[in-house]
């Protein structure tokens, strides 16, 4: 029996509500399969922990997490703790410490999900974002000079290393090649005359190894327009940390909403654990009310199953999400339903069980 050790960080706001559905679903899958199991260890880290202990995670938190095969994370962020502290000291430090340099975010309008785009066929919204996840605009490099004085100066650096750009771009080319899809790079070389000129150069250089991959290159402003007006242009997309962050929330908006937006933070070499999380935040406006849509988390669980090699099960979860969306009987409020978070999780499990009978 293969036992996969998963560290669970439910976090803040709707994090615990959605993550408990994700755990429930993964447990159901393992039970039905019978050939593998998950051992979940829950870590109480997050903003409540900060309020009690003055830190977002244990001092040796990264050392503790290193022993796990994967991390399953809900969301981080709550009032009373500045966002740049809560996120940097938990989510971002994990991504960076574990060199999770690929942030894989599907932007696909599943069957039955609401299509908000006029004149766009649902099947034309089907892309995968490969977002750089450890450096770029979120490298955390900069300075704050003369703080609080009239001559105050703030500098936030964008850090684009050759290694960092090459590896994420190569990963995207490999994905496009394996799936026989086009690859689009999104950058901004006209204004960011160092970082994005360098990015574009590396995109072209790495591309020499992939003559079979059809490529496109867009400036980020035009790309955001095309994502709304003509999304079928995009199949595999590679972009920087900041642009990927923003464009995948736009992606969520055109692919059923934040409640359906999944993501995986991958360390492809598997030297460190990878982390699976819905891309939404802690949604304080609906937290604690069982209103959150758990389907993004279930989709992230599907990515986790894929990562462990259980791709048939990964597909079963997506099929079940689509069935629930098409039937429209058990849905949370963001998708026009009136069911609770856990009712949607239960419905997914019923669908999985029905498929495996
Ligand atoms: P958010 O994603 O939390 O919420 C944006 C909107 O989407 C809200 O109206 C919310 O109700 C809705 N929404 C989000 N997830 C939903 C779900 N599963 N079901 C239904 N509706 C959902 O973004 P925000 O409001 O900008 O940020 C809130 C907090 O979360 C902040 O502290 C922010 O720093 C943090 N944040 C954390 C992460 C993360 O942990 N990965 C990501 C983004 C934001
Ligand atoms: C995301 C989030 C994070 C990011 C924040 C909360 C630091 O917005 O995962 O999309 O920008 O990476
Ligand atoms: Mn984001």
Image (cartoon, grey):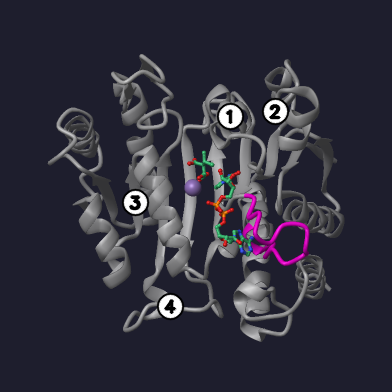
Which disc is residue 85 wearing?
1
Which label's residue is closer to the chain start, 2 or 4? 2
**Is residue 178 visible to us here?**
no
Which label's residue is closer to the chain start, 3 or 1? 1
Figure quadrant of residue 250: bottom left
Give yes or no for contact between labels 3 and 2 (Cβ–Cβ under 8 Å): no
Inspect the magenta stretch and tell me whether residue 32 lies in it: no
Secondary structure under the numbered disc 1 in the rendered image: helix
Q: Residues within 10 Å of mark 2 (few under 14, many from 20)?
A: many
Residue at 73% in and 29% down? 50
Residue 19 locus on image (x, y percent) = 74, 51
Left or right: residue 134 compared with residue 154 = right
Secondary structure under the numbered disc 2 in the rendered image: loop
Q: Is residue 161 above or below residue 229?
A: above
Q: Nearer the viewer, residue 272 or 177?
A: 272
Which disc is residue 116 wearing?
4
Give yes or no for contact between labels 3 and 1 (Cβ–Cβ under 8 Å): no
Q: Main secondary structure of the magenta part?
A: loop
Work out how far the residue at label 4 is from the one at label 1, CA to CA, in angstroms.
35 Å
Q: Nearer the viewer, residue 130 or 282?
A: 282
Work out how far the residue at label 3 is from the one at label 4, CA to CA, in angstroms.
21 Å
Which disc is residue 237 wearing?
3
Q: Which residue is mark 2?
A: 56
């Amino acid at each position: 029996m293969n036992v996969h050790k998963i560290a669970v960080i439910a976090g803040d706001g709707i994090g615990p509500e959605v993550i408990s559905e994700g755990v429930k679903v993964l447990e159901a899958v393992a039970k039905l399969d019978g050939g593998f199991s998950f051992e979940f260890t829950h870590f109480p880290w997050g903003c409540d922990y900060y309020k009690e202990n003055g830190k977002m995670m244990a001092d040796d938190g990264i050392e503790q997490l290193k022993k796990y095969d994967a991390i399953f994370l809900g969301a981080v962020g709550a009032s009373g703790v500045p966002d740049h502290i809560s996120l940097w000291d938990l989510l971002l430090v994990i991504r960076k410490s574990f060199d999770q340099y690929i942030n894989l975010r599907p932007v696909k309008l599943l069957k039955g999900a609401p299509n908000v785009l006029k004149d766009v066929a649902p099947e034309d919204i089907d892309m995968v974002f490969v977002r750089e996840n450890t450096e770029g605009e979120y490298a955390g490099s900069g300075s704050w000079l003369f703080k609080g004085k009239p001559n105050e100066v703030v500098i936030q650096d964008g850090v684009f290393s050759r290694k960092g750009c090459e590896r994420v771009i190569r990963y995207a080319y490999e994905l496009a090649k394996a799936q026989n899809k086009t690859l689009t790079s999104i950058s901004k070389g006209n204004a960011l005359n160092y970082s994005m000129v360098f990015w574009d150069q590396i995109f072209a250089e790495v591309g020499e190894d992939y003559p079979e991959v059809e490529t496109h290159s867009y400036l980020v402003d035009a790309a955001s327009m095309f994502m709304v007006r003509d999304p079928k242009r995009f199949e595999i997309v590679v972009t920087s940390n900041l642009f990927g962050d923003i464009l995948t929330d736009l992606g969520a908006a055109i692919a059923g909403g934040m409640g359906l937006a999944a993501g995986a933070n991958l360390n492809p070499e598997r030297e460190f654990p990878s982390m699976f999380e819905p891309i939404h935040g802690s949604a304080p406006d609906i937290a604690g009310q069982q209103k959150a849509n758990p389907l993004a988390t279930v989709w992230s669980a599907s990515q986790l199953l894929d990562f462990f090699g259980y791709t048939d099960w990964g597909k079963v979860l997506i099929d079940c999400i689509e069935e629930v969306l098409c039937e429209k009987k058990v849905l949370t409020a963001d998708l026009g339903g009136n069911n609770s978070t856990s009712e949607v999780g239960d419905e997914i499990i019923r669908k999985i069980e029905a498929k495996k009978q």
